[in-house]
Image (cartoon, helix red, strand yellow):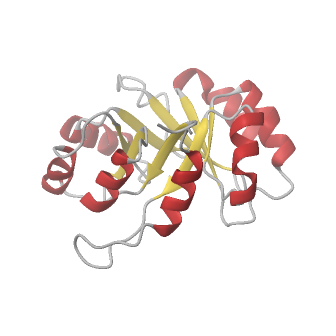
Amino acid sequence: MLKTLVKVSSITNLSDARYCAGMGVDLLGFPLEKISLEQFTEIRNWLAGVQIVGEFSIHDSEFIKSKVAEFRPDILEIDTKVNLVAIQDISIPKILRVNIDTDNLPAVFAASAPYVTHFLLVGDGPESLQGMEGSVEIWSAQYPIILGLEIPESDLDEWIEQSSIKGIGLMAGVEDRPGFRDFTDLMNILEKLETE
């Protein structure tokens, strides 16, 4: 069991999905415009006890609706370029991916909060969190934020135990070849998040 909610994004292979599910990750994200329904179904059939997030970087609401109907994820993740009103009839929970480096976050949070269950806070690079810790804490006290920014491993416990964030967002990796993958980076963080 993990100390906080964890979402792993961009899963496209069974190795990542099974490893994350086995480690107790709550939300497994799949880029639905980059994975076939056959591959997705094959991976999903191996999983139990996790919620499947359909991730989109495409902004066409009709395309998103058709893919959600086809793939049937538990949760939908979109970014700030998607018109939330146009997809409000999709009746599953929604995560809005927001960028700390490019989005006007106070305005986005206020306008989008009625339509989403969580915000996934991402950035353009590993230094995106630097100098923004106070703002992230203020926003997290007001809105349900999953922190998808790179957190120094030494600060992980402090963020989990002393901040208002609702969870941590991580990225999946690439298989070296089918069935073979080095999980070292993911493993280090997930092991640090395990309850004692």
- The residue lying toward the viewer, choosing from 24 and 27, is 24
Image quadrant where one finds the C terminus: top right
Task: Give the number of marks.
Answer: 0
Residue 91 falls in image quadrant: top left
Residue 150 falls in image quadrant: bottom right
- The residue lying toward the viewer, choosing from 91 and 42, is 42
Q: Is residue 68 left or right of residue 166?
A: left
The residue depicted at 67 percent of the width and 66 percent of the height is 125
The residue depicted at 41 percent of the width and 53 percent of the height is 58
Q: Position of residue 131 (x, y in %)?
A: 87, 55
Work out whether 147 lies above or below 172.
above
Q: Position of residue 155 (x, y in %)?
A: 75, 53
Work out whether 26 lies above or below 43.
above
Outermost residue to the front = 196
Q: Is residue 1 left or right of residue 69?
A: right
- The residue lying toward the viewer, choosing from 24 and 36, is 24
Q: Position of residue 183 (x, y in %)?
A: 43, 66
